[in-house]
Image (cartoon, rainbow, N blue to C red):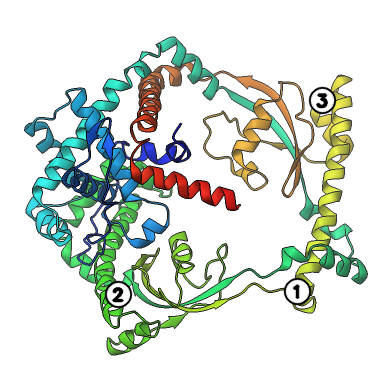
Amino acid sequence: MFGTIRRHQTWLWAIIITLTIISFVIFFSPYARTGNASRGPDNLGTLNGEVITRNDFDHAYEEVLLQYFFMSSGNWLTEADRKANFDPEQRTYLRLLAIQKQDQLGIHVNSETAAQFATQMLQNMHINPPQTFIDKVLKPHGLTIEDFDRFVRHELGIQELIASVGLSGKLATTNEVKALYLREHEELMTEAVFFSASNYLSAVTAPADAVGQFFTNQLANYRIPDRIQVSYVKFPFSNYLATAEKQLTNLNEMVDVNFQRYGSNFLKDAKSPEEAKAKLREKILEEQASLGARKDAINFAGKVFDATNPPRSENLEQMAKSNGLPVQISAPFDRDQPPKELDITPDFTRTAFNLSAEEPFAQPIMGRDGVYVIGFYKRLPSELPTFDSVRDKVSFDYKYSQALTLARKAGAEFDKLATNGLAQGKTFEAACAEAKVKPVTLPPFSLSTKELPEVESHLRLDQFKQIAFGTLPGKTSGFQPTLDGGIDLFVKSKMPPDETKLKTELPNFVAYVRQSRQREAFELWFRKEAEKSLRDVPYFRQKEQQMGARSAKS
């Protein structure tokens, strides 16, 4: 089988996933460098015996860019996205295959259906009138309304392809799905005893010689990793809120419409619908403000990029000074610990570590409170700290390791006592009282439970569910070690789902399961088709050879 396809099955599905637009407003990006990207090799190969023409490839490539735009809430593909394993060339070949399969199965979308779908897409992103989309989104990126029309028809065609090929997935019977529902929604009544290392810290001392030896034995854990510092100019959203409010003349209407669509997401953290609407209003304003911040950041970044050729790190400071913008230097940070003074997303760290003196800049990065234009400042190599500089941390780590041992020892001893007590007809509560530990009565939960705060501070919810549903009612789970100590769980009983809730939720659950299985059936089919059809495409042969070379080196 074709190894590249098999190892990248996650992105096989990515190109045929149904569009789900959840953003309130669209991000317009007048400055982008995706249009000049390399669009594959000169030798494009064949697809099931049909020659891949440059025109067909370019059209499919444009559709991939449009798909990325809609699926990323209005952001265009950047070089940072490419480096983060989004390969538009790979996805273009896969899209070409999907288009070919549409033609082979006689799937063609009429103009009326395409127009309705396109209109709904633009309405979901609050683009009105449509000419705005043409002038401010398509044209700046070298795209036309014909490109958009072709993209829409093929998106609908892919959905029809999923429905046709994945038809077998819809054959799940109601009784079969009902059994699945019952399994996922039956609830456990449980009690747990947590043994946390923090409860045993007071019983531990830290002799100097023991701490010193601990440091020597754990030296690798105290090595300071590679770090980087970046210079940055921030465009805060707060600076654009006033303008955003003036621009959104229909703000109240937008709040009402989106409250009907997404209100449940905001009601969770609100005491009333009015408070939820207020939060929604803030969200919409912030997203509109982010448009202004992003636009200014993009314009500024363009000036920085174009200041010299090749670009130099000092361009950022010089251009900021000439534009009256403050430049700041981040504290050193590593890949796992981003700068604490910045409210940023993981994209910031990933992008920063791709910078160098030779490539000092990246496209603007969207943070949680603003847009950042960053530049390479300094790279700090990994180093070993002196014992004196980390003495307090080492001392605490030593004490915690000893406390962890005590916690787990106590847990194992308790489980032995509880198991013997239950075998003798005693209750779990009696065993807890004898061991002088306090059990926690947990709320009823099922396999479908999404959160359980009482547990998640000790171990992952999926790990806990595995322990719980692997334990018979009336028994304990046995002592189970966790990162902070351990848990001993007693399962009191299983409760079937509420009949009224079952009758209410089952129809939607049946539809969900059938749709999921339909997509799974399609994904399996499409993956096999891709393995067979793309085997002889030069682009993928080259990728496989590169992977083979890297594997041989490692």
Query: What amino acid is at disc 3?
Result: Thr
Q: Quadrant of residue 387?
A: bottom right
Q: CA distance from mark 1 to mark 3?
A: 48 Å
Expressed as whole percent of the image width and height from the top left, the position of residue 473 reads: 71, 21
Task: Report if the CB atoms under discs 1 and 3 are less than 8 Å apart.
Answer: no
Label 1 element class: helix
Position of residue 215 relative to residue 276, above or below, is: below
Expressed as whole percent of the image width and height from the top left, the position of residue 477 reads: 75, 29
Query: What amino acid is at disc 1?
Result: Val
- Residue plotted at (24% across, 71% down): 242
Q: CA distance from mark 2 to mark 3?
A: 68 Å
Query: What amino acid is at disc 2?
Result: Ala
Looking at the image, is mark 2 or mark 1 earlier in the sequence?
A: 2
Nearer the viewer's eye, disc 2 or disc 1?
2
Label 3 element class: loop
Residue pointed to by mark 1: 390
Residue 151 seen anywhere in this rendered image of the structure: yes
Label 2 element class: helix
Specify whether 6 is left or right of 76: right
Q: Quadrant of residue 348?
A: bottom left
- Residue plotted at (23% across, 62% down): 36
Q: Residues within 10 Å of mark 3 (few under 14, many from 20)?
A: some
- Residue plotted at (12% across, 35% down): 114
Task: Report if the CB atoms under discs 2 and 1 are less than 8 Å apart.
Answer: no
Residue pointed to by mark 3: 427
Task: Report if the CB atoms under discs 2 and 3 are less than 8 Å apart.
Answer: no
Looking at the image, is mark 2 or mark 3 earlier in the sequence?
A: 2
Expressed as whole percent of the image width and height from the top left, the position of residue 103 reads: 18, 28
Tag of residue 301: 2
Tag of residue 63: none
